[in-house]
Amino acid sequence: MKTANQPLISLRGITKRFGALTAVNGVDLDVCPGEIVVIIGPSGSGKSTLLRSINFLEEIEDGTIMFEGSEIGYLRNKHGRRHLDTPAKICALRSEIGMVFQHFNLFPHMTVLGNVMEGPLTVQRKPADAAREIALDMLAKVGLSDKRDVFPATLSGGQKQRVAIARALAMRPKLMLFDEPTSALDPELIGEVFDTIRSLGKEGMTMIIVTHQMGFAKEMADRVIFMEAGSFVAQGTPEDFFANQMEHDRIKSFLTRIL
Amino acid sequence: MKVFSGRVCKTILLFSCLLLLLVPMAHAEDYDQIFHEANEAMGSGDLPAAITLLQKIPVSKGDDNSAFVRSRMQIARLHFALKDFAAAGADAQEVLAVYPDNSEAKNFLASVQRERKSRSAVFLEDCLRFLPQLLKGSVMTITLVFCTILISPLGGLLIALGRLSSFRPVSTLCWFIIWLFRGTPLLLQLFFIYYGLPSLGITFKPFTAAVLGLGLNYSAYLGEIIRGGIQSIEHGQMEAAKAIGMTYWQAMRRVIIPQTYKRLMPPVGNEFIALIKDTALVSTIAMVELMRSADQMFNAYFNITALILAALIYLLFTTIFTFIFEKIETRAGIYENR
């Protein structure tokens, strides 16, 4: 599925600190259009922080983010200190990058349809009819057309996460970030969410997925990355990764712990 | 002897005439004596004895201050005190028979008649007498409440957002406003606005001063409540809103603030019920509202019914508000029903 001409997004030396703790330590990553990258690793290794940095939910201390060939998100003032770009610019960038959270974060006061319409309606300022049409398309894509008029509180966890995916997709993002999308779900509900993500992959969506589901990593990923203590320890195709990297002690112990 | 007897007779006649002339004077002195004795009897608690004494004063015409009127009115009051309302009424009637225009007797008769009616009839009569004034006052109370309800949530929202602002001068200013208006008595604020500011050249009409005082005070309180509401919304909601590209203000308006409504209803309802009662304070700055009207009625008639009625009207208002807020709370949280 790799159409490797120019990376869609490339990270160089991404560094994020929380006080004395360095959560992400100089990470480099190139993701090509249509590529599915799965990041695994123990909790606290900086996976989520890295994803959140890509979406500017965390402001990084160092490093650059290139999106479609141009550097984005940060400016330097006249003293050479870096700071986040203007809010308008950041919002525009975020609307091109969809994000799905571990705890869904659906808007509880809006119906399912309202949740999915919200981006096109408020951010893209589309007329209600157009926004509704897009939202209905997206709901059909995640298989929840029949739930459009209910409030999120009535849905199962798996359904909530599919709505969250539809909400992100409604903005027509070029890149989707999944931050442990199934970690808050009962085991029997994980499948439906992965089915949805799988069908997105088939359509050629570029995705970075943080997950603990090794089966999914093996099956879906173009590349698996093992992250620990803020750095990438190892990466490779799923075949290579699971066959050869098992020799890597840290990865082996991690995998045996979660499998 | 005959001559003597004739002289004696003359003398006696003369004396008699003199005596006859002196009789009224002697009577006046007697009446004072009677009043004095009656007072003593009353002092020792023997009211029937006092009545018997006073009844010795005969019916007479003269001015309205005559001993007759004084005695009969005193008897009437004693009968009244003894709860013999029929007799008390008869006493007053006796005075009116001689002096049809005596206002004291008239008023007394009216109160005897009130007293002879059943208590509920009296209460009803009082209600009808006081209600028009009290309702007029209520209209002002409601107007004040509604003006404050229009102003204070907006003011409160501004103060809340200001407090949450990362721009220090704004958050400090809002902190200061809350500190000032929450930390001083509303009564003092009203006094300051209405009586104090004119000395700085700023003069308000009583109504403007009242709405300003109530509005600022309640904005400060609601500001803290709304801030609490906003901060109680899960952080993930703001992140999810930002992740689809919303600005801070879009996220606030579309996602965060609407979710606070249900959570805000109980404390805001509390505040508005307190507001209904706090409007009574503006009676001190020349506003005639419900409390002031009740006070006026109470002072004019020394009748507790005016106060009871005002209490009932306040209770009616607060009860209506309680129900309205319960309804709104249910409606606001409809999305939480599974």
Image (tube, rainbow, N blue to C red):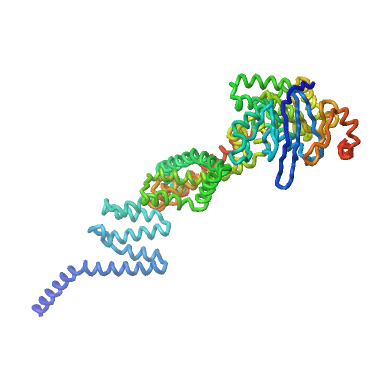
Q: In which quarter of the image is residue B243?
A: top right
A143 up-or-down from B135: above or below: above
Q: Nearer the viewer, residue A19 or B285?
A: A19
Give the tally of numbered discs. Answer: 0
Q: Position of residue A234 (x, y in %)?
A: 83, 35
Position of residue B78 measured from the top left corner of the image (x, y, whole percent):
38, 60
**A126 relative to B189 in the view: left or right:** right
**Residue lying farthest to the front in this orientation:** A79
Q: Quadrant of residue A239?
A: top right
Work out which quarter of the rendered image holds the N terminus of chain B and state it: bottom left
Q: Nearer the viewer, residue B149 or A58?
A: A58
Find residue B265 and report its image quarter: top right
Q: Which of B300 and B12 is in front in this view?
A: B300
Q: Quadrant of the C terminus of chain B?
A: top right
Residue B108 lies left or right of residue B101; in this view the side is: right
Residue B269, x across and y down, in percent = 56, 42
Foreground residue, B282 or B24?
A: B282
What residue occupies the far left of the structure in this picture? B3
Whole-percent x, y for residue A62 in the image:
69, 39
The residue sitting at 73% across, 32% down in the picture is A11
Inspect this view and state whether residue B327 appears: no
Q: In this view, does B310 lie above or below A72?
A: below
The structure residue drawn at horizontal position 54% and vertical position 40%, both measured from the top left corner, is B157
Above-or-below relation of B89 to A148: below
